[in-house]
Image: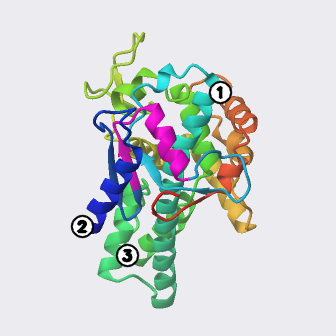
Amino acid sequence: MKFRFFIVLFLINIFYSPAGFAKPQFELDLKPEGVYIDNVNVAVLKQIFQDYGYVDFMHDNLVVPPLFLESMPQDFSSIKSKDERNKLFIMIMAPLVLRVNEELILEAGELDGLRQSFETKDGLSSAQNKRLEELAQKYDVFTRMQGVDRQAILLEELKIKIDAIPPAILIAAAVAESNWGTAMEVKQGNALYKLKDWYTDKGIKPANEDDDSYRIRIYPDLLAAVRDYALKINTDLNFEHFRLARVKLRIHSKFLKGRMSAYNMVLGSPLENYAGLLTYILTFYDMVYIDAAKLDKPRLPE
């Protein structure tokens, strides 16, 4: 606890400047997986990125510092340069999507352990079966079979659904759905992807929309929004083509690339020419580098 408190104070002192803020308003919280940043403006965020050596995303062997923004900067929409704003949005999103993919890879490894145990012992223990059922519920896998046959089916179906997603796809989708993070839904509820909940009054009422049967889902932070969208990709029927294409790539030990996956996202949004839009975003900003990027370990800034 003392170490964590010291690091937080150290970071705050770095960014405090008498010429800038009379009193720091932003929040930094160091956790085992990285630094969480909240209540920040664009100028301070840029300084934090710079102190970590995080100044660009378009180069080989990209290692992204684990800096997780909890909500968009208050003045993000006021950035005058569209190119500057867009690049900053990509840099904000990169640690978030890489973190979510790390979580997916860990779950996939856990599932692989269950599969190996099942194959060697002809079944799972009570604790293992409980975990398998939890994953099946989370990833919307269902069968009426029971016993060992049920376990075999769940393991096979979950293998298709639990896997990483090209980071560039997660960013490009956020770009398309949130207009580069400037949409009203992002400001009100961190709703990067505008996922809907039907027949409820909980959530954000869509603007300029006659249909009152749904609300836009609200999230406590940006990371939760990315997690939810990744789960949608890994479960929703509209992304089945994406998942099947991913399985084929894995069989041939192929690297997952956003640009290669874009046309399997065609049913993923009501936006017109969605696959083409994603491809344009991925190509224009050379996000192939983000697909190959790695998340750095938590550390002090350079």
The residue under label 3 is: 147
- Regarding residue 217, the answer to whether it shows in the image is no
The residue under label 2 is: 2
Residue type at numbered disc 1: Asp
Q: CA distance from mark 2 to mark 3?
A: 49 Å
Q: Give the camera-side residue of 224 and 22.
A: 22
Which corner quadrant of the image does residue 285 belong to? top right
Q: Residues within 10 Å of mark 3 (few under 14, many from 20)?
A: few
Q: Secondary structure at mark 3?
A: helix
- The magenta span reads 35-52
Which corner quadrant of the image does residue 191 belong to? top left
Q: Which one is earlier in the sequence, the residue at label 1 or at label 2? A: 2
Residue type at numbered disc 2: Lys
Residue type at numbered disc 3: Gly
Nearer the observer: mark 1 or 2; the answer is 2
Position in image of residue 65 (x %, y %): 52, 56
Q: Secondary structure at mark 2?
A: helix
